[in-house]
Amino acid sequence: MQYICVLGSTGSIGTNCLEVIRAAPERFHLDAVVARRNWEELGRQTQEFDPRWAVLSDANQRGVVQADAFSPRTELLFGADAIERVAASPEIDTVVAAIVGAAGLRGTWAAIESGKRVCIANKETLVVAGPLVMDLARRRGAAILPVDSEHSAIFQALQAGRREDVKRIVLTASGGPFRGWSPDRLRGVTPAMACQHPTWNMGRKITVDSATLMNKSLEVIEAKWLFGLDDSQIEVVVHPQSVVHSLVEFVDGSVIAQMSPPDMKLPIQYALTFPERISGPSPRLDWSSRFQLDFEPPDPDNFPALRLGYEVARRGGTCGAVLNAANEVAVERFLSSTDGFGFCDIPAACRAVLEQHHFEPSPSLDALVRLDQWAREETWKWR
């Protein structure tokens, strides 16, 4: 039996993870659930799964929640310190890190420091502190397994050969809802338009990231640290059907791809069961029906966020923390629609803040945390 903690259990990745756990009760036990403030959904999860702990990271919810909404067998905790305590608990075998943004770093760090299996859906952890995180995992004997569909695909395809025989990896991108749009049309994009993804059902922030291609930019940085690659070995191709989740090309010219319907349950399950594969709730491709797969190069002129990812992957150091923080605030400003901050302002603001920060090639975790806060403040002021 594998005892699992899900950080971000009420979000898209978290609820998909619970479906995987629900389908295999003989293998998985949900021992802890963590959310920011959605106590109603968190309470329903405890009523079904009876976890040992439930945590609300927003301590202000302490006076709001109704205790009878939670299972009497679940201990309810509050605050960021409680997340770290639960993630590091010896009763937990596996932590699924699915809290969106830099807010997920502390819990993920605690789980890695405790030497656990960490199924990482929070790409920002590696974007912000990739070298530190991977070094900590090596020293503590923690296993970091990717949950992002693209990085899971790379991880699966890498099983076909030796790492030293990898020529390059190719991350696929759906292209979002604005593929092929002109710059003039992009300037008129509204939050409602940006939140309509053509193939994936995700939260608002990551859906906007997909629309700007910033999501792919962050994935380039994540892939560099996760797989120990040079940035020149990472490419991006637009694949609107979202069936081929990514590819690995080996030195002999063989290209290994991982394919499945656009659904997160398969990569979550693979991270939980690796190196085994088991039957599960993921949908299957229908090989009896005609379908086609299209691929095309991305347009970095119309979607400049992608260039930022390669620049940050090349420079390393403090750049990832600054880019991630600036993007989180820029997306928040765009979605709030209160100060005229537009869709095309997202990558522009990120570039401006990135260029004005004081670069450090080998920062400490404390330095990254300080720069994260600085970049957020600068992005709120950017005009």
Image: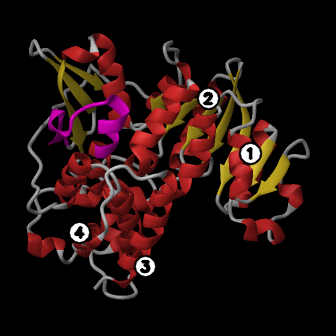
Q: Amino acid at mark 4?
A: Glu
Indicate which disc residue 355 carries: 4
Q: Nearer the viewer, mark 3 or mark 1?
A: 1
Label 3 element class: helix
Asked if the residues shown at circle 3 and circle 4 are in contact, with their CB atoms under 8 angstroms apart, the answer is no
Where residue 176 sits: x, y (%)?
Answer: 25, 54
With 54 as the anchor, is 17 left or right in this view? left
Q: Which span of residues is magenta-colored? A: 221-239
Q: CA distance from mark 1 to mark 4?
A: 37 Å
Identify the mark nearer the N-term, 2 or 4: 2
Q: CA distance from mark 1 to mark 2?
A: 13 Å
Q: Amino acid at mark 1?
A: Arg
Identify the mark nearer the N-term, 3 or 1: 1
Q: Quadrant of residue 244?
A: top left
Asked if the residues shown at circle 2 and circle 3 are in contact, with their CB atoms under 8 angstroms apart, the answer is no
Q: CA distance from mark 2 to mark 4?
A: 37 Å
Q: Nearer the viewer, mark 1 or mark 4?
A: 4
Name the residue nearer the viewer: 260 or 142: 142
Find disc 2 in the rendering and name its residue. 116
